[in-house]
Image: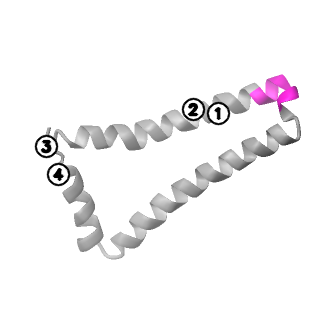
């Protein structure tokens, strides 16, 4: 499949949209920082033994899996679909 329409849309945003390059960089870095914060929060929970409270820990695991599924559906799948635009 032709992937050029997907990349040309990003190029259009960076070149033709006012402050598009800034929006793209803030979005990418903000999303990465958000996941780093999530992983630090999990690490803190493991360090302090929060996993011993089973119900709370299991809800957190469900939230993490939901968060990762949402990120996958919102980012990975659209890029795959955009390859069919051309």
Asked whether the residues under the numbered discs 3 and 4 touch, taking CB atoms below 8 Å apart as contact, a structural biologist would say: yes
Q: Is residue 19 above or below residue 42?
A: below
**Residues at marks 3 and 4, CA–CA distance in whole angstroms:** 7 Å
Instruction: Give percent across and percent down for residue 43.
Output: 76, 43
**Residue corresponding to mark 2:** 66
Tag 1 or tag 4, which sits nearer the N-term?
Answer: 4
**Highlighted range, magenta:** 51-57
**Residue corresponding to mark 3:** 2
Instruction: Give percent across and percent down for residue 48.
Output: 88, 41
**On residue 74, which mark appears?**
none
**Within the magenta stretch, is there residue 52?**
yes
Tag 3 or tag 2, which sits nearer the N-term?
Answer: 3
Q: Residue visible at 32% across and 41% down?
A: 78
**Residue corresponding to mark 4:** 5
Q: Residue visible at 54% across and 60% down?
A: 30
Q: Nearer the viewer, mark 2 or mark 3?
A: 3
**Residues at marks 2 and 4, CA–CA distance in whole angstroms:** 30 Å
**Within the magenta stretch, is there residue 21?**
no
**Residue corresponding to mark 1:** 63
């Amino acid at each position: 499949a032709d992937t050029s329409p997907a990349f040309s849309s990003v190029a259009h945003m960076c070149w033709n949209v006012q402050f598009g390059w800034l929006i793209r960089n803030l979005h990418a870095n903000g999303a990465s920082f958000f996941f780093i914060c999530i992983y630090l929060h999990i690490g803190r929970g493991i360090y302090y033994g929060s996993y011993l409270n089973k119900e709370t820990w299991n809800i957190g695991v469900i939230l993490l899996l939901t968060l990762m599924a949402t990120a996958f559906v919102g980012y990975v799948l659209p890029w795959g679909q955009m390859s069919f635009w051309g």
